[in-house]
Amino acid sequence: MEALHTVADGDETRAAGQTQQFVTFSVAGEMFAVPMAPVQEIIRVPDVARMPLTPPALEGLANLRGRVLPIISLRRLFGTPERDNDDATRALVIHIGQSLGFVVDRVASVISVDASEIEPAQVVRSVVQTDCLTGVIRREVPDGHGGHRDLLLVIDFARLVQQHLTRMIPSRESGAVSGSRAADGGEHADRAEPGEGSGELRLVSFTVAAQEYALDIADVQEIVQVPATITAVPGAPGHVLGLISLRRRLLPLVSLRSLFALADAELDEHHRIVVVALPGGGQIGLVTDTVKEVLSVPRSQADTMPGILARDAELQEFSAICRLDGGRRLVSIIATDRLLGMDSVREALQLGASGVSGSSERSGSADSLSSPDASMNRSTHSMTSHPDDEDAQVVIFRLGAEEFGVPIMSVQEIVRLPETLTRVPRTPEFVEGVINLRGTVLPVIDQRRRLGMDAIERNDRQRIMVFTLGGLRTGFIVDSVAEVLRIPRQNIAPAPQLSDEQIRLIGRVARLDGDRRLVLLIDPTQLLAAREVRAIESLEPAGESRTAPSMARAA
């Protein structure tokens, strides 16, 4: 009995003498019933994104045709032994102020019950407390031996949720203030802390033919894999690889190897497209060999392009060179406004805006993260016709199998996790240790521990995401950093309110890839409480007197 829909809401009780319909189901060997009126659907148990900082009974969040649906285990609520789901396991979608999915072992049937068949709940003992039952249905069931009486316990799901999941109330736009900030960057998330804008450059670095380059983070719209298919455009300049469709808009791809007159290389899974916003509203995809890291670089370490080089027309796209690691590492900064002045880039933009017909497909070797369409035509809108002001730009990271997102402008840096962390005596328990990040002591916190998740062995995929919280730089260890994405605002919904701590930290959820993928959006301003910031501030004097390990560069 799949996708059972209720026709209309109604009272859960009926006058004496009238019949009422119930959905019956079993959990841990006992039979239960629920009035049919609040039952919206009966579905197979969907895949879920596990939400941290929530009650144990919550299995996670699912996407049900564009709705974020909390999935709750009745076995956990009842305190009975858990078991793996099988072909008979179902989720009852019940509306209690908001839609909730309750996992049951088996759905039996829909029955009509006369009011005279319902007795008070106090007459039975069950795994469910009697105050969460509205009654007991006693029915004669023929079995060939004179029959027997079945007992069906009628559950009051609203009372059950109220007792065990007190925060699971309808989400309100006005009640998810922190979630709103997490989704769209908020009023302050896109702005640097006071004094930072004038003292530091924030860059996304990448490599082309073993040389390192960077762009201002504010100009980077998103970072995606090279898709399996690129639509080549006849007569296009050699540096233009072709067009892809990214979120229903044409995006021209420019090979930086070709643009910089470097040797070509076959595209593979390591190549990335850095989507750049150009002055005037256009976008272009720069194909790089690898994306390395997010950097915060003191302006004192960035030198303007030497005069003799700045006069070279072939170097006009570079604005400065950064000296890192004591001058052993040089990073050339590309200025997007100067890119627009290059004939080759303007030609690529014109191709994207015109949607040239007669194009052919070109295969790449990497899977697409952005699901570009294989074919495009003139009906596709111009790249400059739909501004992205309503999109949220986020960095996606992973903890276990779950994906989380933070506003890109809140991320100061993303760096490798060194082999060892220096422990400082009398540090708060939640601080893993400190590292030396270009001469600054950086406290490091394990994000898994903060979210109540199991610890894992240190590995080379882990990264430290650096945020400025309360004026203090703090690093958080994550399992991996996946990508940078622009998420349309219509794909972002309020997260269910499952606990006070959760709703402060994770107030919204993004639905991606045709609603098959859920990303939990974190408000970085809520990562640490005020008292924790004060506790971390006390580490700096002690940390400065100690030698912390050198910071390794991210790959």
Image (cartoon, grey):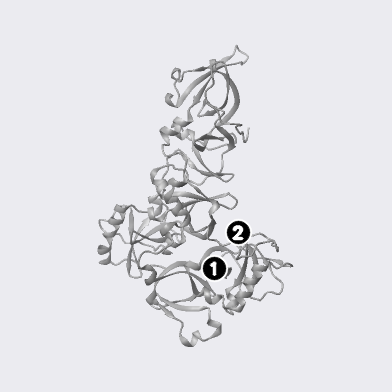
Query: Residue tagged by mark 2?
Result: 247
Query: Residue tagged by mark 1?
Result: 276
Q: Is residue 141 above or below residue 239?
A: above
Task: Tell me which residue sits at (54%, 71%) in the image.
Answer: 279
Inter-mark Cα distance, 1 to 2 = 15 Å
Task: Tell me which residue sits at (47%, 54%) in the image.
Answer: 183
Q: Is residue 60 above or below residue 153?
A: below
Counting from the top left corner in percent of width and height, residue 418 is at: 39, 63
Residues packed near mark 1 inside 10 Å, few (<14), some (14 to 19) or many (20 plus): many
The disc at residue 261 is none
Q: Residue furthest top?
A: 146
Q: Residue furthest bottom?
A: 308
At mark 2, the secondary structure is: loop
Residue 553 appears in the figure: no
At mark 1, the secondary structure is: strand
Quadrant in the rendering for residue 359:
bottom right
Report the front residue among 425 and 457.
425
Counting from the top left corner in percent of width and height, residue 203 is at: 45, 69
Residues packed near mark 2 inside 10 Å, few (<14), some (14 to 19) or many (20 plus): some
Side (left or right) of 307 relative to 246: left
Q: Earlier in the sequence, mark 1 or mark 2?
A: 2
